[in-house]
Amino acid sequence: MSSVINRGISKAEFDNIFETGIRISGQYCRILVASGQARVGISTPKKVGCHARRNRLKRRLRDAVKINVNLLSNELDTVVLGKIEAESASFSEISADIGQTLAKANELWEKQSAST
């Protein structure tokens, strides 16, 4: 699954996930999931600062997703949007938040799929 994290999602696919996906907010991230090919995209807001600070946050988010890879669904594309608060958080806090938020996203997706 880690190769999926490194593969990325195109701009058009990001837009599709934003339009059709389910949004779940955690303390340090917002996660969007939509049916797809089990890919993961990472994004950070420009409010974080210069590109070096945004890239550092992306690396931390990517590593936190890799730790929680067992929570990724094989049938969903996932976008992790880092919040500005994540920049000052410890890695363990970010990792725990992503794990909890991914679990909630999977739960909501299953409920929505079961009701349709």
Image (cartoon, grey):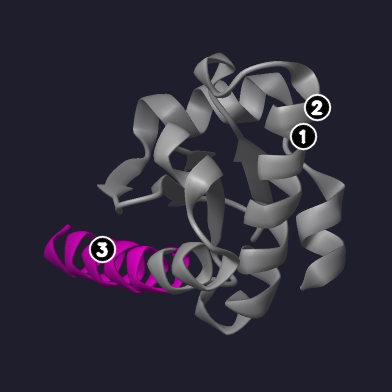
Using a 10 Å C-alpha cutoff, classify the residue at mark 1 as few (fewer than 14 neighbours), some (14 to 19) or many (20 or more): some
Please name the residue that numbered disc 1 is placed on.
55
Looking at the picture, tell me which residue is in the foreground, 65 or 10.
Answer: 65
Where's residue 15, x and y in %? Answer: 53, 21
- The residue that label 2 is drawn on is 52
| Badge 2 vs badge 1, beta-carbon distance below 8 Å | yes
What is the number of the mark on residue 113? 3
Q: Looking at the image, is mark 2 or mark 3 earlier in the sequence?
A: 2
- The span shown in magenta is 98-116
Q: Residue at x 34, y 72 (%)?
A: 100
**In the rendered image, which quarter contains the N terminus?**
bottom right
Among the 4 quarters of the image, the one containing residue 79: top right
Label 3, residues with CA under 10 Å away: few <14, some 14-19, many ≥20: few
Tag 2–tag 3 contact (CB < 8 Å) = no
Seen at 58% across and 15% down, the residue is: 46
Secondary structure, mark 2, is: helix
